[in-house]
Structure formats: structure tokens, C-alpha cells
Image (cartoon, rainbow, N blue to C red):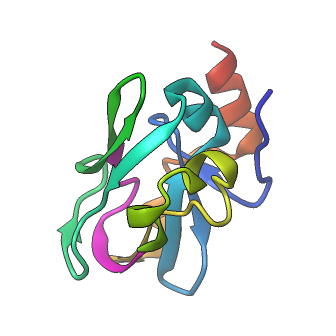
Amino acid sequence: MSELKSDFLYSEEHEWVQTVGEDTVRIGITEFAQHQLGDIVFVELPDLESNVKAEDSIGTIESVKTVSDLFSPVTGSIIAVNDSLQDSPELVNSSPYEEGWMIEIRVEGDLTAALSSLMNAEAYRKHTEE
């Protein structure tokens, strides 16, 4: 099984969510997802200050195999994007939970409520085994 971070939350679409502030989360794709995609060759991310809604497509991840959508697991506004991915999209493969993070979102409304539909590591592990 792919590595999972026990203090992260996970979406059904294979995004991970890390709380990095009282109303801010960092988002990327899981090791499972990057493995399924294969070698990442391009990542298109949303613009800073863009408003996003939970479950909306907010970018694309292009690999040698396919192009996949990146979905926002929460509603809010983009406050940071990982510019390193423009020149080095392979960071998503080599370090999906650290250097390969994609965006940070300031969550609209209550953070706990916004994260309530996401899975913990154990639930996500079961999800990927189905």
C-alpha cells in the first residue's frame, strides 16, 4: 500500500488535505494517485486569489498516461500555489506529501465543518482497496 500521513485527511478523488493554519489547508494528490497516473509531466494550477468550491475541478495533472483533474476538497480562496511544479512537475511523483504539494486554500466558513466529509487515513486506505 502507498504511504499515507495519519494527520492528513483524504478525498474520494485522491487529494490529501493538511491543516496548516486556523483557516488554511494545503492540498496535493496522494501517493496512490501519483502512482496510478505514472510520470507527471505538467501541472496546471488555479490563479492566486481564485475562489473555488468544494468538489469543483480547479486544475489538471498531466502524466505520460493521461490527463486528470485536480479537485478542490473545500470551498474558499487560493492563497498559495506551488510554483516549483511549473519547472519540476516530477516533484509530485518523488515527494507527493512534501515538495509536491499543489495549493493552499483559505477555507470559507468553519474549518471543521468544511473538512467533515473527508476521510481519515484508515478510511482512505479502505477506499483505495475497494
- Identify whether 106 is placed above or below 102: below
Residue 23's x, y, as percent?
A: 48, 83
Question: Residue 81 lies in what quarter of the image?
Answer: bottom left
**Residue shown at 77% from the left, 53% from the top:** 5
Q: Residue furthest top?
A: 130
Q: Reply above or below: 2 against 47.
A: above
Quadrant for the N terminus, please: top right
Identify which residue is drawn at 68% across, 58% down.
Answer: 8
Q: Is residue 120 left or right of residue 118?
A: right
Q: Position of residue 35 (x, y in %)?
A: 62, 30
Observer-nearest of 112 and 81: 81
How many numbered marks does the figure carry? 0
Q: Residue lying at the far bottom in this picture: please name it.
A: 22
Magenta stretch encompasses residue 80: yes
Kindly tell me whether residue 116 is visible in this rendering. no
Between 48 and 71, which is closer to the camera in this rendering? 48
In this rendering, position of residue 26 left or right of residue 123: left
Q: Tell me where the magenta segment starts and ends, as one range.
A: 70-81
Magenta region, main secondary structure: strand
Height in image: 19 above or below 129?
below
Can you name the residue that lies furthest to the front here?
Answer: 87
In the rendered image, residue 106, in percent from the top left (x then y), is placed at 38, 80
* Residue at point 64%, 23% (across, down): 128
Q: Is residue 104 visible?
A: yes
Residue 124 belongs to magenta span: no
Residue 62, quarter of picture = top left
Residue 47 relative to residue 33: left or right: left
Question: Residue 71 location, x and y as percent?
Answer: 34, 47
Task: Name which residue lies at 53% across and 35% down.
Answer: 39
